[in-house]
Image (tube, rainbow, N blue to C red):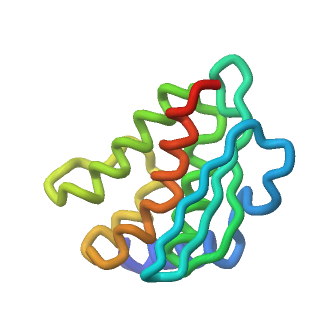
Amino acid sequence: MSNQSVYKEVLLDHFHNPRNKGELDGMAMIKRGSNPRCGDEIEVGVNCNDEILTSVRFRGRGCSVCLASASIMTESTAGLERQQAQQLTQQVQHWFEDKNSDPPDDDALAALSSLRQHSARKKCVLLAWVALGEVLDCPG
């Protein structure tokens, strides 16, 4: 089985069984993002304790790429220090904006690599990551 097939299966699994998707009641910080072209609307919520992301959740609707990316994002950032999560968010954005950049050092993000060749899907992939970046930039 090729890496592309494995990545597609991982993305489909995250789409059909999204992790950390649901209501954001009780979340300390929430930011919203939308992609009118695709109809994606995502809200990302975070709870922190001593600068550690204790909970990262999302809710919303969107295409399979957007929801799979949001699900992967929550798993990759929960438990990180706020600064580490900010750095990872910036790395993912740079990785998708610069085709010559190296991938972030996180194996869980490997499935997203298959989407880098589809520039039309970049905003779908990055929507939740941008919202998380905005949440983490807020004082709190």
x, y percentage for residue 82? 56, 28
Which residue occupies 18% across, 60% down? 99
The residue at 47%/82% (across/down) is: 38
Q: Residue 55, image x and y in percent?
A: 73, 40
User: Taking 70 as reference, is 88 above or below it?
Assistant: above
The relative height of residue 138 versus residue 95 in the rendered view (above or below) is: above
Q: Nearer the viewer, residue 4 or 55?
A: 55
Residue 55 in the figure: left or right of residue 101: right
Q: Residue furthest top?
A: 50
Q: How many marks?
A: 0
Q: Residue at x 24, y 57 (%)?
A: 97
Quadrant of residue 114 within the rendered picture: bottom left
Farthest residue toward the left?
Answer: 100
Residue 59 image position (x, y, % from top left): 71, 63
Viewport quadrant of the C terminus: top right
User: Residue at horizontal 29%, vertical 59%?
Assistant: 96
In the image shown, does 55 or 46 lie closer to the viewer? 46
Image quadrant where one finds the N terminus? bottom left
- Residue 120 in the image: x percent, y percent? 31, 78
Foreground of the two, 100 or 106: 100
